[in-house]
Image (cartoon, grey):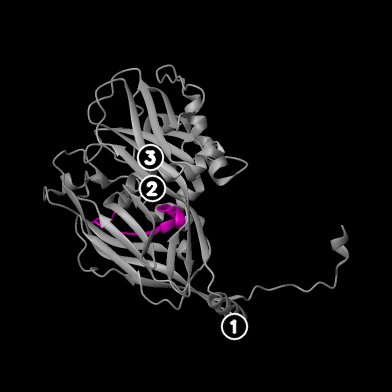
Amino acid sequence: MAEILEVTNVPEYDNVITGLEYHNHQAYNSSKFESSDESRICIQSQDLYTLPSESVLNIEGQVTDDSTTDDAVTNTVRFISNAISFMFHEIRYEIGGKVIDVINNVGIVSTIKNYLSLNENQSKALENAGFGENFKRDATGYFNVRIPLKMYMGFFEDYPKILVNMKQEIVIVRANDDINCFTSTVATSKPKIKINKLEWCVPYVKVSDKMRVKLYNLVNQNDDLRLWFRSMECLLIPELPLTDRHVWSVKTSVECPNYAVICFQTNRDRNILKDSSQFDHCNITNLKVYLNGEAYPYVNLNLNYTNKQTALLYEMYCNFQKSYYRRSITEPLLDKETFINKSPLFVIDCSKHPESLKSTTVDLRVEFEASANFPAKTRAYCIVFHDRLFKYNPLTNIVNRVV
């Protein structure tokens, strides 16, 4: 209660930041960015304070269909949720010529991350990025999206500070075709996306004279600055064998996974008749992740979709927000019925692991079994979350990876 007596207090104003301006940077090949092409967008000037965590991709384009000129048939083609992300095969972020973070299978990974991380209100805001059922083109096929890069890579989500005096580059690789961006009731539809504008919009930060001197002295101390974030890696089996169980040796690395998300798709890749942003449970009854022999989860799942025995699977999905973002409550984007029927994700939390795993090579293995043989053309995805640490020197522009 003592603070109510402090009548002489003077209000404090934050005048350290004197300006925040978005600058648009275009790709070298901005006039042409076709299937399988690589596009680079660079910030060359190094005498800058940028805020990459708030940067976005601004994309303008048009949908065409080579298969027919019949408007009635063309109108059966529609965007799936997160459609524009499925247009990209890979996106890399580089600082000082060093790859800091990368995402492959961009559509799959960003869709899964959104299902895990967003609540209903946040998903509405991302309609502007093409996420959700309401994203549409106009009558002539044109569309415009602004995609926050924090939706794609852990660096932009986890590192909210300015970057001091460093060259930066975004490298974007388009997919072989755009079929996965759409669904249609006509199997012969061949929709394509023509990109008319691709820009990387980055905030430039202006600071007060006092702060400029402070940052100048920091740079001249020749000290390294640290970049800590969580990165995602996507691994896949293109087609599972026609059996009811499988052992998948996913990878061996020095990075210890904190989370592994496993999901399955049956005949959805490059199939215009099916939605690539949805997943299939494939009658999986049990699934475990092993890190050097340590099993996660410890108990069996004992799932049964016919008898609605799926409570544990949905609970594991909901708990991701509590564990990953350290929230006291969880606000899942998907209700239980939608989750089971359209996007069943096997979310394995292995963040609490023995200390020994942090100082040795880790073998990641996934074992799963089903109540029936896996359907033909079934893909398995494993999204691995792990920590990364880099350091950079704003005076020498040298970037090194620590972890």
Circle nearer the viewer, 3 or 2: 3
- Residue sitting nearer the eye, 326 or 382: 382
> How far across and down, in percent of the image, does residue 354 sit?
55, 36
Res 192 label: none
Which element carries disc 2, helix, strand or loop?
helix
Return the residue at label 1.
209
What is the CA distance from the residue labelled 3 to the residue labelled 1? 50 Å
Front residue (pair 125, 318):
318
Q: What element carries label 1?
A: helix
Q: Mark 2 points at which residue?
A: 110
Near mark 2 (Cα within 10 A), the count class, few <14, some 14-19 or many ≥20, is many
Looking at the rendered structure, the secondary structure element under dot 3 is strand
Q: What residue type is labelled 2?
A: Ser
Q: Disc 3 vs disc 1: which is toward the camera?
A: 3
| Residue furthest to the bottom | 209
Residue 132 visible (yes or no): no
Q: Point out the tag, 3 or 1, that comes first from the N-terminus.
A: 1
Tell me the residue at 43%/16% (across/down): 307
Q: Nearer the viewer, residue 24 or 146?
A: 24
Task: Examine the rendering and report whether any part of residue 178 can be seen.
Answer: yes
Which residues fall within the magenta stretch? Answer: 137-155
**Is 303 rendered above or below residue 394?**
above
Name the residue beneath numbered marker 3: 252
Sequence-first tag of 3 and 2: 2
User: Residue 117 appears at what percent x and percent y?
Assistant: 48, 45
Residue type at the position of mark 3: Thr
